[in-house]
Image (spheres, grey):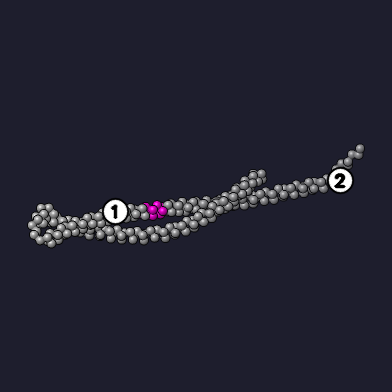
Amino acid sequence: MQAVLIELNALDVWFSDAEQKRVRWLKDVKSKDREVANLNLRVDAADEALETVQNSLSVLNAEQAALATQRIEQAHRISEHLSAAYRLSGQDFLKLLLNQQSPDTFERMMRYHRYFSDARMESLEAYQTTLISLVANEEKLNLRLADRKTRQAGLALRRRALVNEHLQRKTLLASLSAQVESKTVQRERLQADRNRLEALLAELRRRATELDGSQFASRKGSLPWPVYG
């Protein structure tokens, strides 16, 4: 009987501790549910922001393609200007210029030469500007891409951590529930043992009382009288 009581008391302590754990873990699960829900909202907002970034990247890619086309066109114009300038430079141009008898023709040739020289310089400057724009555009693209990847990685990492913590708490709760079920069966068995033992002890006491009463009745008239002092 004493052993049964000791086990029942130990089970009462275990159930009290288990209930405290259950309440605490349920609170953690609810907290993680809220965190996951808030994170999902942040993910949705980040997805919208990333979509905006993606659209911007598409625009930048279009600009880069346009700049690349412009660079090819400028390179072609520079090639033409350089060829024309070569034809109008050096001894050939000087001989041609010195052989001119007409001042108007001389002036027109000089003007053409300056035109080609100026056009060549403008094309070179425009080409340089285009190259600078391409480099700046590429740097902007790389920064946007790096920012997007960093945010995606951060959100994915946090979501995985929260989901893992949530699953761990649910696993603990499931394990605790299984233990509670097992301990409940054990407690019910011990309680039944206790009830049987108590019933047995009560029966033994009843029989002992009945036995004492019947012995007293059977000896009635044969018991010695009390001694008077």
Q: Secondary structure at mark 2?
A: loop
Would residue 129 be found to the left or right of residue 145 on screen? left
Q: Quadrant of the N terminus?
A: top right
Which region shows up in magenta? 145-153
Residue 76 is situated, as x and y percent measured from the top left of the image, at 20, 58
Nearer to me, 25 or 88: 88
Alpha-carbon span between mark 2 and mark 1: 134 Å
Q: Earlier in the sequence, mark 2 or mark 1?
A: 1
Let me know if residue 87 is in the magenta part. Answer: no
Nearer to me, 99 or 225: 99
Three-letter code, disc 1: Ile
Residue 145 is situated, as x and y percent measured from the top left of the image, at 36, 54
Residue furthest right as drawn: 229
Report which residue position mark 1 lands on. Answer: 132
Residue 160 is situated, as x and y percent measured from the top left of the image, at 44, 52
Nearer to me, 127 or 106: 106
Residue 208's disc is none
Q: Is residue 162 visible?
A: yes
Query: At 91% from the left edge and 39% from the top edge, which residue is drawn?
Result: 228
Query: At 38% from the left edge and 58% from the top edge, which residue is drawn?
Result: 53
Report which residue position mark 2 lands on. Answer: 221
Q: Residues within 10 Å of mark 2 (few under 14, many from 20)?
A: few
Nearer to me, 63 or 52: 63
Q: Residues within 10 Å of mark 1 (few under 14, many from 20)?
A: few
Let me know if residue 150 is in the magenta part. Answer: yes
Please tell me whether mark 2 or mark 1 is closer to you in this view: 1
Three-letter code, disc 2: Gly
> What secondary structure do most residues of the magenta stretch adopt?
helix
Would residue 164 be found to the left or right of residue 56 on screen? right
Q: Is residue 92 visible?
A: no
